[in-house]
Amino acid sequence: MKSIYLFPNKLKIPALLLFLISAILFIPSYSYENELFSIHATVFSFIAEYPFGETMYFTWLNDEISNEIITTLFIISGIILAFSKEKVEDEFIQTIRFKALVQSTYFTYAITLICVFFTYGVPFFSVVTLLIFVNLIFLNIFYYTKLFIYKKQFSYENED
């Protein structure tokens, strides 16, 4: 099996810490009364539209960016966590990683289809945004659960 590019194993622990911290900060950062993590900055926007305002294209604007920072940390750390090498990286572990990726994709799109038929209006966009995170969360859950089971089974075989 051809080897795929993976991140170094030494990035796994920092990625796990950032992933957990950003997951914890995610909920308060997306609430409308977000006073705890308010960071304002001037940012460039391809397109921006505020409620009861005009649509602006390719402009600089002053906006609150804590959501973007937490989202970026969550996505990057989740990808690094899922695609970091194990200490012993063999074909079976690559198969486990691939199967977890496939299962999380199926799971995410099943949830997407359910939401398409049962969520309407503005809340649909919130659900679609959350589905980005659901895919990463379940990719890591499926992968590390299967890896744990494999390592536990492998350690029992070596004890005999």
Image: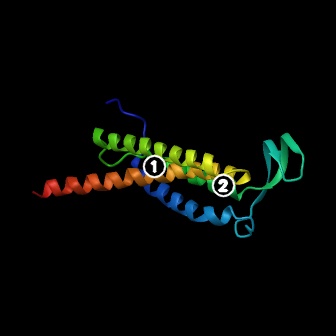
* Occupied quadrant, residue 83: top left
Residue density around tag 1, few if under 14, some if 14–19, many if 20 or more, within 10 Å? many
Colouring: rainbow
Asked if residue 23 is positioned above or below residue 94 in the image, the reply reads below
* Mark 2 vs mark 1, CA separation in Å: 21 Å
Q: Nearer the viewer, residue 6 or 10?
A: 6
Residue for badge 2: 69
Residue 156: percent from the left, percent from the top? 17, 57
Q: Nearer the viewer, residue 53 or 87?
A: 53
Q: Is residue 40 toward the left or the right of residue 104 in the image?
A: right
Which image quarter holds the C terminus?
A: bottom left
* Occupied quadrant, residue 90: top left
Q: Are marks 2 and 1 in contact (CB under 8 Å)?
A: no
Q: Extreme top residue here? A: 2
Q: Amino acid at mark 2?
A: Ile
Residue density around tag 2, few if under 14, some if 14–19, many if 20 or more, within 10 Å? few
Q: Amino acid at mark 1?
A: Leu
Residue 56: percent from the left, percent from the top? 86, 42
Q: Residue at x 73, y 50 (%)?
A: 121
Residue 91: percent from the left, percent from the top? 29, 38
Residue 5: percent from the left, percent from the top? 43, 36
Residue for badge 1: 139
Q: Residue at x 68, y 61 (%)?
A: 30
Which image quarter holds the N terminus?
A: top left
Q: Extreme left residue here? A: 160
Q: Extreme front residue here? A: 117
Q: Is residue 100 toward the left or the right of residue 128 in the image?
A: left
Q: Nearer the viewer, residue 72 or 55?
A: 55
Q: Residue at x 40, y 34 (%)?
A: 4
